Amino acid sequence: MSTSSWTSNTLAVGGSLLKRAPWVWAVLGSMAAWILIGVVTQRFTLGSLTINATAASFLAFVALGQMLVITGGGGGIDLSVPFVITLSAYWSCGLMNGSDSRLLTGIAVAMGLGLAVGLANAAVIIGLGMPPIVGTLAVGFLADSAVNVYASHAKLGAPSPALADFVRGSFLGIPRLVVLAVVLVVAVGLGLRWLVAGRQLVAVGQGEQAASLSGVPVGIIRAGTYLASSVLAGLAGLALAGYNNSAFLNMGRPYQLASIGAVVLGGTFIAGGRSTAVGTAGGALFLTLVLTLMQSSNLGIGVQNVGEGILIIAVLLVAGGGSSDAAAARRGGRWRRGRQDPVANASPLGRGGDVSSRTRHEARP
């Protein structure tokens, strides 16, 4: 075999692998950023990767919930997550007030607030038909108002010492937050692949009409993703408060666009229908390492914000192009099937007519 043919075959195999496992880009980018940090700081240690992985765990919690919303398609996106984080941190700290005896109450409040915001998001989007980008932002502003009212009338509390010790501790030399993030990634990834609800979510993202005709409760499935996203954001706010030993206004703001960027960077289609939990976690780590790299380079905060924004926009543009191509391919496939089967195309059910027809014939004895 000649060198040119071997090279072309290698590139073809590599390209095919990257298409089947898009999370590889996030992992490779994270390794490259880690190496560059070592070059800039002249301290190439495993400890720097561990510290960044701990910081990335908070983003991974939020991004995994965001990934579920995006996977459901329909323009799904959750812009309320930063407000849920701050709201959860403030109210849980206020109730715990530095007491271990109120730890369970603080956890329940964080999850309850997440459920409340998730239900509100589902109500305005699924129930009222409001666009997700508008509905979640509106609900987020309400949550932000609740934080401001609470902060102006109540004394700022403190997280439980047991909570602070837990989120700062380690298990077998690995930070507990990283362990929790890995467990969550595995659970979400297996759930999407093996659970009925997970497969239904992917089906809804790939084609809402086809999923509905197949009996999938589209509205319930999508509503569940907003609940999961808000609950994970609430728990992330609780963990952040414990790690920082306090809550502060706008503490969730960095996670709004970063959670979306981590999801898309990890290989999830922004249009829905395909997602990867491992890639989302890798995207969270990559964005965290890039931010650390800019800080290590002594760049100003303004330059850091601009650099992070440009990176996220570039990722969204690339992902949006890929999603548009996939959507165009699906539309082209439906157009061709419609031309080949004019009877089904003329059905009162539109493009789904041939599906219902097949179902009736298959159900006959």
Image: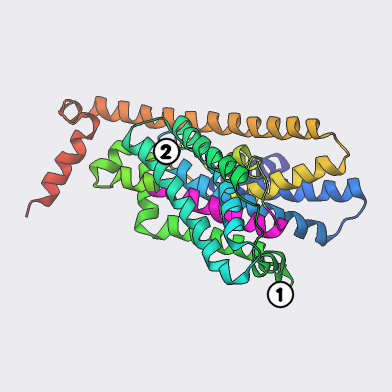
Q: Residue at x 12, y 45 (%)?
A: 360
Q: Is residue 17 visible?
A: no
Residue 71 on the magenta span: no
Q: Nearer the viewer, residue 10 or 154?
A: 154
Task: Tell me residue 41's x, y (percent).
Answer: 90, 49
Residue numbers of the magenta segment: 224-246
Task: Tell me residue 100's x, y (percent).
Answer: 62, 71
Q: Residue furthest left?
A: 365
Q: Which residue is mark 2?
A: 73
Q: Residue at x 59, y 54 (%)?
A: 236
The image quarter in which residue 117 lies = top left
Task: Tell me residue 361's x, y (percent).
Answer: 11, 46
Q: Secondary structure at mark 1?
A: loop
Q: Residues within 10 Å of mark 2 (few under 14, many from 20)?
A: many
Q: Quadrant of the C terminus?
A: bottom left
Q: Looking at the rendered structure, which numbered label has been put on residue 172?
A: 1
Residue 226 on the magenta span: yes
Q: Nearer the viewer, residue 163 or 127?
A: 163
